[in-house]
Image (cartoon, rainbow, N blue to C red):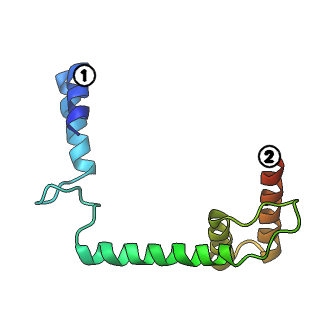
């Protein structure tokens, strides 16, 4: 923040700088402790969030590790981001049929394989 203020101070008019700082303070109100309002507020909330994130990553890694060996060289194996995307699309999306979601994943993995050297 100090570097931004120094850069702005050197490059902007004083009136422009005051307007910018007023808009910045309105967008990111500071709390008593001096932290930005959207930052973590306590240990318990942070601990729960990190625990759930690590659990989700462990679940994705477990799914990726239990894949059968890929005998078909036409597609790349399922990656963690692709598994996450598939689970999200299959569980949370009701607008697309399951076959369309699986076809799209198959198409992406085939084209990713083609793009690899």
Rendering quarter of residue 13: top left
Judged by depth in the image, the label closer to the viewer, 2 or 1, is 2
Q: Which of the two residues, 46 or 29, is positioned nearer the viewer here?
A: 46
Q: Which of the two residues, 97 or 103, is positioned nearer the viewer here?
A: 103
Q: Which of the two residues, 85 or 72, is positioned nearer the viewer here?
A: 72
SS category of the residue bearing label 2: helix
Tell which circle, 2 or 1, labels the residue nearer the N-terminal end.
1
Q: Is residue 112 visible?
A: yes
Disc 1: which residue: 12
The C terminus: image quadrant: top right
What residue do we see at 69% from left, 76% from top?
A: 90
Q: Is residue 13 left or right of residue 101?
A: left
CA gap between label 2 and label 1 equals 47 Å
Q: Alpha-carbon neighbours of circle 2 within 10 Å: few (<14), some, or many (≥20)?
A: few
Q: Is residue 32 left or right of residue 63?
A: left
x then y, percent, for residue 3: 23, 33
Q: Which of the two residues, 2 or 96, is positioned nearer the viewer here?
A: 2
Q: Is residue 77 left or right of residue 89?
A: right
x then y, percent, for residue 94: 69, 77
x then y, percent, for residue 65: 66, 74
Q: Which mark is residue 35?
A: none
Q: Alpha-carbon neighbours of circle 1 within 10 Å: few (<14), some, or many (≥20)?
A: few
What residue do we see at 24% from left, 74% from top?
A: 43
Q: How many discs mark residues in the rendered view?
A: 2
The N terminus: image quadrant: top left
SS category of the residue bearing label 1: loop
Most extreme residue toward the left is 32
What residue do we see at 19% from left, 56% from top?
A: 35
Disc 2: which residue: 115
Rendering quarter of residue 50: bottom left
């Amino acid at each position: 923040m100090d570097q931004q203020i120094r850069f702005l101070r050197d490059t902007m008019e004083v009136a422009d700088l005051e307007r910018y700082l007023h808009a910045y303070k309105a967008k990111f109100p500071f709390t008593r402790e001096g932290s930005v309002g959207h930052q973590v507020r306590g240990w318990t909330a942070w601990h729960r969030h990190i625990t759930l994130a690590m659990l989700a990553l462990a679940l994705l890694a477990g799914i990726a590790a239990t894949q059968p060996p890929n005998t078909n060289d036409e597609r790349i194996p399922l990656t963690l981001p692709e598994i996450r995307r598939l689970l999200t699309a299959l569980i949370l999306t009701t607008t697309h049929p399951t076959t369309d979601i699986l076809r799209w994943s198959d198409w992406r993995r085939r084209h990713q394989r083609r793009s690899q050297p």
